[in-house]
Image: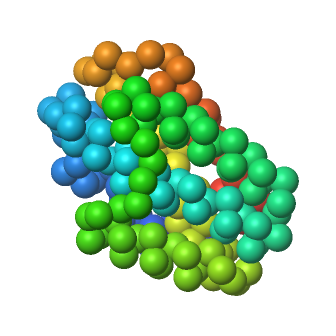
Amino acid sequence: MHLDTLLDESISRWDLLESRFYQAWSEGCLPREALATYAHEYGAFISLIPKGWKSHGDEKIAQEERSHIDLWLEFARHLGVDIGHPKIPAVKELITTAEELFSDATTSLGALYAFEAQQPRTAASKLRGLKDHYNFTAKACEYFVLHSQDEHEPALL
């Protein structure tokens, strides 16, 4: 069995699309306030992704990811929030873990793969939810449009 198959099987146990949060988003049952909180809180994690790529040794992708922060910020601003310091304990823990894992070339590899491998599917699901159930501008959806088609980054790891 190939390593990527083993990794994907391991990651599948934490399939983000199985969470109640993402299911509610997809169904249009998530209040806008919850989306705003998500945009504010999770933006702190999105802001760390360049660090992981830089530690991995790929400055070109790190720079690309820095530009993606602006796309996330546009999503957040559409909801009337900014990217901020997380207050939710689970997000604080995610940030602490990501900072630790993204500080090392070896651990950044696994952490990035776990994130990037799920990114296209989750972004596509979020995008469908935003288009079908929420009144979002095309500009506010750009982060999700880009990442729903972003199959190349997991292949680089």
Image: 64 above or below 27:
below
Image: 13 above or below 101:
above
Q: Is residue 136 left or right of residue 74?
A: left
Q: Is residue 115 left or right of residue 156?
A: left
Residue 31 picture location, percent across and down: 17, 34
In the rendered image, which quarter is residue 101 located in?
bottom right
Residue 123 picture location, percent across and down: 47, 40
| Viewer-side residue, 107 vs 138 | 138
Q: Is residue 114 left or right of residue 126?
A: right
Image: 11 above or below 15:
below
Q: Residue visible at 67% across and 66% down?
A: 51
Tell me how many marks there are.
0
Q: Residue visible at 43% across and 31% down?
A: 77
Q: Is residue 42 left or right of residue 149?
A: left
In which quadrant of the rendered image does the C terminus lie?
Answer: bottom right
In the rendered image, which quarter is residue 30 located in?
top left
Residue 4 picture location, percent across and down: 62, 68
In which quadrant of the rendered image does the N terminus lie?
Answer: bottom right
**Colouring of the image:** rainbow
In the rendered image, which quarter is residue 128 located in?
top left
Q: Using the rendered image of the protein, determine whether residue 50 is visible from the camera's viewpoint.
A: yes
Q: Using the rendered image of the protein, determine whether residue 6 is visible from the camera's viewpoint.
A: no
Q: Residue visible at 37% across and 38% down?
A: 81
| Viewer-side residue, 13 vs 143 | 143
Q: Residue visible at 76% across and 67% down?
A: 54
Residue 12 picture location, percent across and down: 41, 64
| Viewer-side residue, 117 vs 138 | 138
